[in-house]
Amino acid sequence: MNLKEWIVLALALGGTAFIVLAAVGLLRLPDLYCRAHALGKAMTLGLILLLLALWVELGVTHAGLVLPLAVLFQLLTIPVGGHLLCRLAKRRGLPQWRPEEEKRSQP
C-alpha cells in the first residue's frame, strides 16, 4: 500500500467511527436535544471525513472537484437542520431530560 491508500484508509475509518458514534448516541441518549447534538456533531465530522477520503482517492477529476462543494454543503446544512429541529421541539414544549434525584433512605 502506498501513502495515498493509507491516507484514504485513515480518513474512511475515522469517518466510519464518527458515524457509528452518532448512531450510538442516537440510541443511548435520553432526549431529542441530546440526540440532535450527538448527530449534529458526530455525523457532520464523520461524513466530511468520508468525503475527504473519497476526494483523496478520486484526485483531480470532475467528481473530485465537486466534492469540496459537497463538504461545504454538509458543513452548512447539518448544523442548521439540527438547530431548527431543536428549536421546533422547544416551541412545541418538548421537555428536556433532567436526571432524577437519587432517593435517599431514611436512617
Image: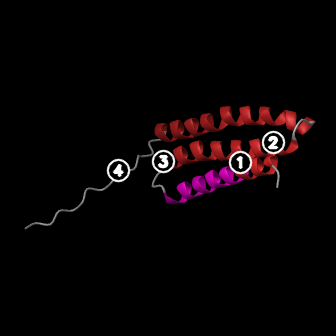
Q: Which residues are magenta?
A: 12-28
Residue 11 bears which disc, if any? Answer: 1
The foreground one among 63 and 10 is: 10
The mark that comes first in sequence, 3 or 2, is 3
- Magenta-drawn stretch contains 13: yes
The residue depicted at 75 percent of the width and 41 percent of the height is: 52
The mark that comes first in sequence, 1 or 2, is 1
Q: CA distance from mark 3 to mark 4?
A: 11 Å
Residue 98 bears which disc, if any? Answer: 4
Residue 56 bears which disc, if any? Answer: 2
- Determine the main secondary structure of the stretch shown in magenta: helix
Specify few, some or many for label 1: CA neighbours under 10 Å numbering under 14, 14-19, or 20 or more: many
The mark that comes first in sequence, 1 or 4, is 1
Q: Disc 4 on helix, strand or loop?
A: loop
Specify few, some or many for label 4: CA neighbours under 10 Å numbering under 14, 14-19, or 20 or more: few
The residue most toward the right is 62
Q: CA distance from mark 3 to mark 1?
A: 26 Å
The mark that comes first in sequence, 3 or 4, is 3
Q: CA distance from mark 3 to mark 2?
A: 33 Å
Mark 3 residue type: Cys
Q: CA distance from mark 2 to mark 4?
A: 44 Å
